[in-house]
Image (tube, rainbow, N blue to C red):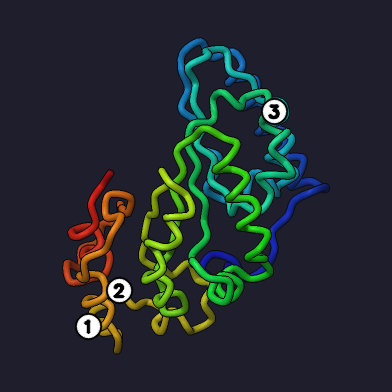
């Protein structure tokens, strides 16, 4: 998506691939011999179902302690077809954070370049019906998807028990000069007042909407979301 990538990053061969593969093999060995419960986060720098390196890592993953738990961060587009990858550790997978950044087809396919709305819904429907785990849908708020915040209630009604986490857009150096236009959480943004009024409006499903964003700018969208949306 434009908020974190300017191009596709995919290591499948060569020296850098081998270096990273050796690191992951070493981690597999450490994990397999660790006698206490582990809490694993997969992953913050790519999709575990799309990366050749992570696919190999997960296929070799074994926990010595049965109470070890896994949180999977993903865009959700490969959940159904590649769930067999995690069958060996399925009982350990307790949480999902799924980055979608939209609640409509038009917005989703704009802010998640190359993604398909129908494929996303197919995978989310499958996950809701087949996997017993906590799920949080991640939504990075920006000018391009601001209108979709009003669709939160209708989208959550499709997935009882799931939650939404709103986050402010950050500048990772990928915006090519357009970041300030997207950063609607900033006080100086032209539509900041409109955003503030929208966030302050009462919403159903408040107990299923949360934010863990912290900022020193107390007048920002992030602060308002933290203040007004309740933790489940």
Q: Circle 3 — which element?
A: helix
Q: Badge 1 is on which residue?
A: 193
Q: Which mark is residue 175?
A: none
Which of 102/37 is in front? 102
Give the number of marks.
3
Crowd band around label 3 with a 10 angstrom C-alpha radius: few (<14), some (14–19), many (20+): some
Q: CA distance from mark 1 to mark 2?
A: 10 Å
Q: Nearer the viewer, mark 3 or mark 1?
A: 1
Q: Badge 2 is on which residue?
A: 185
Q: Nearer the viewer, mark 2 or mark 3?
A: 2
Q: Circle 2 — which element?
A: loop
Farthest residue to the right: give it. Answer: 13
Q: Badge 3 is on which residue?
A: 25
Q: Residue 22: name its quadrant.
A: top right
Which of 226/81 is in front? 81
Residue 20, image x and y in percent?
69, 40
Residue at x-position 59% and y-position 43%: 127
Q: Residue 184: name its quadrant.
A: bottom left
Which of 52/224 is in front? 224
Residue 45, image x and y in percent?
56, 50
């Amino acid at each position: 998506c434009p908020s974190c990538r300017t191009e596709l990053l995919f290591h499948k061969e060569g020296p850098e691939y081998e270096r990273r593969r050796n690191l992951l093999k070493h981690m597999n060995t450490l994990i397999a011999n660790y006698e206490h419960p582990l809490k694993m986060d997969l992953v913050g720098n790519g999709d575990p179902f799309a990366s050749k390196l992570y696919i190999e890592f997960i296929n070799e993953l074994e926990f010595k302690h049965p109470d070890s738990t896994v949180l999977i961060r993903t865009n959700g587009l490969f959940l159904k077809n590649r769930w067999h990858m995690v069958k060996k550790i399925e009982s350990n997978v307790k949480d999902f954070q799924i980055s979608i950044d939209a609640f409509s087809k038009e917005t989703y396919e704009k802010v998640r370049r190359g993604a398909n709305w129908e494929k996303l819904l197919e995978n989310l429907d499958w996950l809701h019906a087949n996997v017993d785990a906590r799920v949080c849908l991640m939504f990075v708020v920006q000018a391009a998807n601001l209108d979709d915040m009003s669709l939160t209630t209708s989208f959550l009604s499709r997935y009882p028990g799931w939650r939404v986490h709103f986050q402010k857009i950050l500048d990772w150096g990928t915006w090519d000069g357009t970041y300030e236009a997207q950063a609607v959480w900033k006080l100086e943004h032209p539509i900041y007042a409109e955003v503030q009024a929208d966030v302050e409006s009462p919403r159903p499903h408040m107990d299923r909407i949360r934010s863990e964003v912290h900022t020193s700018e107390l007048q920002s969208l992030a602060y308002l979301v933290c203040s007004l949306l309740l933790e489940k």
